[in-house]
Image (cartoon, grey):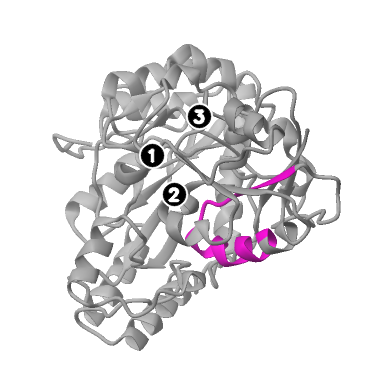
Amino acid sequence: MNFLLVYPAWPKLQFQTEFHLPPHGPVVMAAAIPSWVTVTFADENVDSIPFHGSWDAVGLSTMLTCQLPRAFEIAREFRAQSIPVIFGGIATMLHAEDVKRHADSVFLGEAEGRLEQVFLDIKNNALKPEYDYLQNFPDIKLVGPARRSILKHEKYEYKGTRMVDLFHASRGCRFNCFPCCTPYLGGRNFRPRPIDKVVEELATIDNDRLFVVDNSLAQNKQWELDLFTAMIPFKKHWCCHPIEDDIEVLEKAAQAGAWYVYQAVFDTSDFIRKRIARYKNFGIGVEGTIILGTDDHTEDFIKRLVDFLMEIDLDLAEFTVLTPFAHTPIRQQLESEGRILSGDLSRYTAGEVVFKPKHMSPDKLQELYEYAWNTFYKREPQRYKMYKLLKRIMERKDANMAGEVSPSLQPGENAGLPLPPHG
């Protein structure tokens, strides 16, 4: 059976540097496809889609809401050729009812141990309209190495440098953050992969730079310590979402090659200031992820927040507009208050205002979003700041080869900064 797996193109944020990472969802899903199926992968962000191949079925892997309009166009072209089209991925799960109108079948949930039957149904012309495994999670031990062999790695370079490979060590999240749909998709129970499975997958990745895409690594201290200990021998450099605010954990993360973290910044508190300083004291860079337009944001607050980010010397900042994605707590709130202004999925990029802010007009919030990007990167463009982070890796490699001490703090040091009770 010849199966074409497609990852539709999606628009980058207006102010982001244009580069493309190898997608994670398709390679994880491909690992669960039975061996008797021949898989061809097309990432429309870096390559063209072979619309006129000899395909027995086509899969559309959708991560982002704003990918769906393009995915629907792609599906229409294949279905016009009487080729069955099945949708899966995060955006499909969030918008299942919409997607069903454009698909022969939708797959909802995690794929491990479930795709053999799907492809048997395709083979027997018995494809079901829906395979629903939402909130019915497979045994985490079934999650093996992603199938990165389907990728064209040369397509994922920026100025001659290979981009990070994506990797995950856990699923689920015990937190319930207001803009996040993870509790709906992956559940509130933290589901760590066994460390030996993590090691098995790391051994298959030939890239020395990774993006650990777990929602948060700050879920279980002992597991974090075990994870970072297992990562040390691989000598990789990696970025991730938050790490627990604990000296022992931060030290171990630095030893394991933590390059930088994505840290949410919601206010200008001393807690945030010290949190950022602790990362940097261990040689770990910080990219602030800043959502603009929450109900406590005024114009003056947002401008002060941007000034604060420059004061604390963030390495990078990514600004987004609060976006009420489906199945999130903020979506429920704004819908109940009649503040959703648009249901156009193509506008759900996190760079457009699609709701009515509490303290300003939608146009003013859009203006402040642009102000934040322009002001933060006025002195040093984003490309230059990215270069400085990459240069830090090169310097660390050189220091390690020369047997010099890592730039992180020595055990027990913390520059006089008190630690909070939680991560």
Disc 3 designates what residue?
A: 257
- As for residue 62 lying within the magenta part, the answer is yes
Q: Could you say which is closer to the camera, residue 416 or residue 372?
A: 372
Seen in the image, is 62 located left or right of residue 361?
A: right
Q: Position of residue 12 (x, y in %)?
A: 58, 65
Q: Are marks 1 and 2 in contact (CB under 8 Å)?
A: yes
Q: Quadrant of residue 254?
A: top left
Disc 1 designates what residue?
A: 134
Q: Could you say which is closer to the camera, residue 65 or residue 209?
A: 65
Disc 1 element: loop
Q: Earlier in the sequence, mark 1 or mark 2?
A: 2
Please, what is the three-letter code of the amino acid marked with disc 1?
A: Leu
Give the spatial CA distance, label 3 vs label 2: 34 Å
Disc 2 designates what residue?
A: 93
Vertical order, 31 against 62 (above or below):
above
Q: Position of residue 281 (x, y in %)?
A: 35, 39
Disc 3 element: loop
- As for residue 216 lying within the magenta part, the answer is no
| Identity of the residue drawn at 20% across and 40% down | 417
Q: Position of residue 273 (x, y in %)?
A: 25, 52
| Identity of the residue drawn at 44% across and 15% down | 195
Please, what is the three-letter code of the amino acid marked with disc 2?
A: Met
Quadrant of the rendering where the C terminus is positioned: top left
Extent of the magenta region: 57-75
Disc 2 element: helix
| Identity of the residue drawn at 40% across and 42% down | 241
Q: Are marks 3 and 1 in contact (CB under 8 Å)?
A: no
Of the numbered discs in the image, which one, if any, rests on residue 34? none
Q: Earlier in the sequence, mark 3 or mark 2?
A: 2
Q: Position of residue 378 (x, y in %)?
A: 49, 74
Give the spatial CA distance, label 1 vs label 2: 8 Å
Please, what is the three-letter code of the amino acid marked with disc 3?
A: Gly
